[in-house]
Amino acid sequence: MNDISRRPPELGLDPDSATASTLHGRAIFLLASPATGAERLLAALGCFPGVAAAPVPTHMFSVGIHRILEHWWIENGPQALSGLTTNQEFLLNVRLLADEPLAAYRASTGAERVVEYSADHPAHADEIAGLYPDGHLIHVVRDGRQVATRLASPMWGWAPRYAAKRWIDDQKSILEAEDHPLLVVRIEDLVREPREVLAALAPHLDLEAPPDVLERAAEAVGAARHLPEIPPGRAAAIVEIVGSDLLRRYDYDGRRAPAAQWAGGWGEMMASGSVGVGRRIGAEVKPHVTKAARTAARALRRHG
């Protein structure tokens, strides 16, 4: 059997221990899939007094912190880091390491708080929540059909099934961190009513929001009061087939993809079964989409 890396059994840093961090209560993380538009909220929050918006993604969890946590102990191998320290001491030191990029930027700007967005954060939502019990986590969500359609566009170049799977997996990973208080912002609402959404969000972040600040922040969101929509294609159909429960959870309406795209979506998942992708996606289809599956099957017969 191959060695399997493992994280600490208790991932939550003790809140009292977190007070040792220079970023205690000062870090804001945006959790959002790529192509969601979370950069708009990042720019808006950077307009509030005392808040510095990180100018570039740090990717610190996906390329660094996650790897360290995974080496707490190794199955069928040496104790790894678990033999050197206690669980809480380990988590505190990992937290202090994670602080460094944001703490340095905060210090260089003189800001009280710092907000950061990296597109890979959703996959590590439980790690961020565990290491930052004092942090503010904002889930920025967009209609998964639009996100997947963009990821499957020539600009991004993802296969439709992977584009759909990315949005679905991201939302599920974020939901697994729901024990940590999460603020949810729908990007469609932010773009349509930026002042109202930001005014409602500010108290939860302990931010002052006088009218002039809200005006600047609203302008930073962008001039357009609606998001351009791409006609739903195969990637959107796969999101509807597999992730309908997630769409409903965030108040996105029902089916939009044409029957032909549903047929194509099912066809792509079936064709990918040889490499296991279709099986993994198909296994997650909930009972409440059985009727939809039958509809798609009829569409397959019509367009076959």
Image: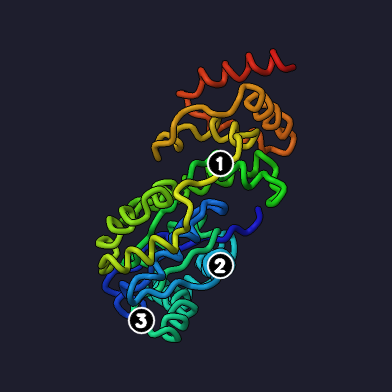
Residue 207: % across, % down: 28, 68
Report the side of 173 relative to 150 (left or right). Answer: left
Q: Quadrant of residue 23?
A: bottom left
Q: Residue sitting at 37 percent across and 74 percent down?
A: 51
Residue 106: % across, % down: 42, 81
Q: Residue sitting at 47 percent across and 58 percent down?
A: 222
Q: Of callouts 3 and 2, which one flags the residue occurring earlier in the amino acid sequence?
A: 3
Mark 3 or 1: in front is: 1
Q: Quadrant of residue 245?
A: top left
Q: Of callouts 3 and 1, which one flags the residue occurring earlier in the amino acid sequence?
A: 3
Q: Residue sitting at 31 percent across and 72 percent down?
A: 25
For the residue labelled by badge 2, is the local secondary structure a helix, a strand or a loop?
loop
- 77 above or below 139? below
Assess whether mark 2 and mark 1 are in contact (beta carbons under 8 angstroms): no
Residue 188: % across, % down: 44, 46
Q: Which quadrant, please, contains the C terminus? A: top right
Residue 250: % across, % down: 40, 40
Q: Amino acid at mark 1?
A: Glu
Give the label on residue 59, or none: 2
Mark 1 or 2: in front is: 1
Q: Nearer the viewer, residue 47 or 257?
A: 47
Give the label on residue 229, or none: 1
Q: Is residue 73 visible?
A: no
Give the label on residue 22, or none: 3
- 300 above or below 231? above
For the residue labelled by badge 1, is the local secondary structure a helix, a strand or a loop?
loop
Q: Callout 3 environment at 10 Å: few (<14), some (14 to 19), or many (20+)?
A: few
Report the side of 57 relative to 109 (left or right). Answer: right
Q: Amino acid at mark 2?
A: His
Assess whether mark 2 and mark 3 are in contact (beta carbons under 8 angstroms): no
Distance in Å between CA atoms under marks 3 and 1 = 42 Å
